[in-house]
Amino acid sequence: MKSSIRTALILVMFASASWAAAPLPTVTVYKSPSCGCCGKWVEHMKANGFPVVTHETNDITPHKQRLGVPTAMGSCHTAEVNGYLVEGHVPAADVKRLLAEKPNAKGLVSPGMPQSAPGMDDLRKIPYDILLVGNDGRISTYARH
């Protein structure tokens, strides 16, 4: 009887482990030390399961250039995750979708600072788009919020 209980417990442990989601990759963020909305976006990403490493810098431009952020698509902070750029206040759900779909692209951008995007927290729910930047430089709508 004891061995059957032990076997059942072992099976439950293995089943639980196989159902557990794989850990999310680390998001590396480059932001100004004085930007409050960037800090709120970092908290949004952490609350949605992403480990985050933050680099505070007064000049984010070299990171934007290195990652290929189109000039007119910049925002207040720049991030990278699994080889993709994430520019601005992109919702965590869109980043998770990007990582699942693995498109042939540079990454996602949320140009400017949409007032109802994560970290901006305007309760009016002002519509905004998340854009996909292709490796060829083409821009397409990825999500509408």
Image (cartoon, rainbow, N blue to C red):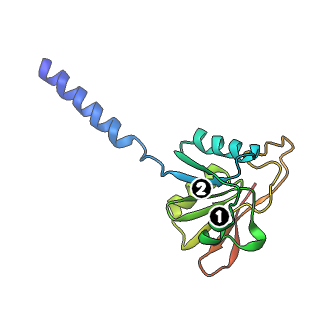
> Which amino acid, by three-letter code, is at mark 1?
Leu
Q: Residue furthest top?
A: 1
x 75%, y 60%: residue: 75
**Image location of residue 19, percent across then percent down:** 38, 41
Q: Tell me, for residue 108, which label it has, or none.
A: 1
* Helix, strand or loop under label 1: strand
- Tell me if 127 is positioned left or right of 78 in this view: right
Q: Residue at x 33, y 43 (%)?
A: 18
Q: Give the mark nearer the N terminus: 2 vs 1.
A: 2
Q: Nearer the viewer, residue 5 or 120?
A: 120
- The answer to whether the residue labelled 2 contacts the one labelled 1, judged by CB atoms less than 8 Å apart, is yes
Give the image location of residue 66, x and y in percent: 60, 71
Task: Check disc 2 and report the residue beneath it.
Answer: 95
User: In the image, is 88 to the left or to the right of 48?
Assistant: right
**Mark 2 Cα-neighbour bin, 10 Å: few <14, some 14–19, many ≥20:** many
Residue 111 shows in this picture: yes
SS of the residue at dot 2? helix
Picture quadrant where residue 63 is located:
bottom right
Please tell me the numbered disc located at residue 139.
none
Residue 36 position, x and y percent, is 75, 43
Name the residue at 66% across, 79% down: 137
The answer to whether residue 1 is visible is: no
Q: Quadrant of the N terminus?
A: top left
- Above or below residue 46? Residue 7 is above
| Residue found at the far bottom of this picture | 136
- Label 1 crowd (10 A; few <14 / some 14-19 / many >=20): many
Residue 126 image point, x, y percent: 85, 51
- Check the image and report above or below for 68 versus 86: below
